[in-house]
Image: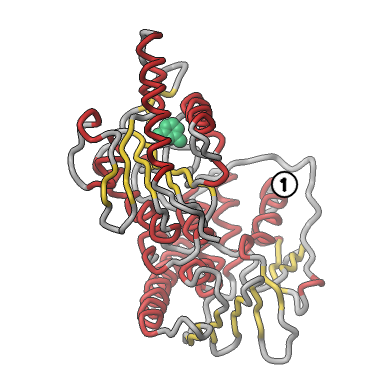
Amino acid sequence: MSDMTVTLAHEADFAGWRAATRSLAGRHIPPADIAWQVAARPESAALPAPDPAAARFTVPRAVMDLAAIMVQSALPERFALAYTLVYDHVMGVPTGESMAARMAGAKEDVLAQTRHLRDEIRQALSRHNAAAPYQGHVETTSHVPESNARFLTLQLSFAPWQLDMPDRTLRWTGHEMLREAPGQAPQPLDPTGLPPPALPMVPDLDIARITSLRAVALAAKTCLVCPMAAHATQTVFGEGRESARMMFVGEQPGDIEDRAGRPFVGPAGQLFDRALHEAGIGRDDTYVTNTVKHFKFRRTPTRRIHEKAGPAEIAACAPWLAAERRIIRPAVVVMLGVTAASALLGRAVTISRERSRIIAMEDGSDGLVTVHPSYLLRLPDEAARGREYDRFVNDLRLAATRLGPAVT
Ligand code: URA
């Protein structure tokens, strides 16, 4: 007999479920003592108050991912199943066989529906006339569409869309996500409170379709395509003006950039800023990015040591860099160092041979290869450092001469 009722705000309220679970599993409340229900109106949601006496616990990512899959399944008891998973983990007991079998079935179903929905969306988008809001239809009673709302929003670069299901409509207005069901007032859904999708978004996204830098940057933040992504703190995407006419491309974020989440803010970035200033270029007027968006490093007991990005990482990140160039369409692209130059020119590059001259790029922009600012930091001899720094500033000045008059 349940002696506690949790009332969630809506059918895919993963955030509410997670908050309640944190409190209840931390107090070791058995699954049988909890009744899970969904509020008729979101304002009547009722979660247990956070309990400071509840034990804090951590749950492996795989357990939380499976819980998120349960929450978006069509099973009526999905919130209880997801809770049982976490509770069993906290108590250190194996999940019972019949329950494990039910979860495995639900997982299969959610995965199949996710694949099906994304296939449908991809096919529909290839026929979609971008001038009109996208409107699709899917036959499902699960909450897979809610979990994939972000996928659709990014794929459509935040343009309005609507997805109709037999019992409800999901709508992105361009500003907010709404769930509409017959006889109910439209209910705003916070996309960050929905269960994450059962399949990673990035391998399924058609990055070449995305037209806004914001959508590309948000999508890149979920990218786990290469192994580096699992070790780095975060994706460090490019930053600067979407209308920038000059783009700088480095190698990969360093230790400080990895922690800050911003490119070129460590020692190499400070030297780069100084050189930009001397060349009369305002960093705020440019776009600064990297060939590879995650920090690759080797760990020692005290430090994380930079390791050069290899062909696999460069290839994994190539669609992000291509999207940045396609959307920004800079007049001038400055390649800082050999990794950027080889990636953008598509061939092996020797910096001393290619630097300090304008190269016609295949997209019509002017390219310029120069040294990476870290190279200047590494030069042991002060006189050589001064000379090389001056050459670097001259390269930046040469790049700036290609900008021509500003387009207003
Ligand atoms: N080196 C790079 O190539 N990029 C950064 O963002 C920092 C250091």
* Rendering coords of residue 281 (x, y %): 52, 38
The answer to which of 333 and 303 lies nearer the viewer is 333
The answer to which of 399 and 131 lies nearer the viewer is 399
| Outermost residue toward the front in this view | 405
Residue at 39% x, 53% y: name it: 320
Quadrant housing residue 8:
bottom right
Q: Is residue 136 above or below residue 361?
A: below
Confirm whether residue 229 shows in the render: no
Residue at 71% x, 60% y: name it: 33
Label 1 SS: loop
Disc 1 residue type? Arg
* Rendering coords of residue 245 (x, y %): 46, 52
Q: Left or right: where does residue 53 sit relative to residue 109?
A: right
Q: Left or right: where does residue 252 sit relative to residue 77?
A: left
Q: Left or right: where does residue 115 sit relative to residue 345?
A: right
**Residue bearing mark 1:** 27
Quadrant housing residue 363:
bottom left
Residue at 34% x, 46% y: name it: 226
* Rendering coords of residue 21 (x, y %): 67, 54
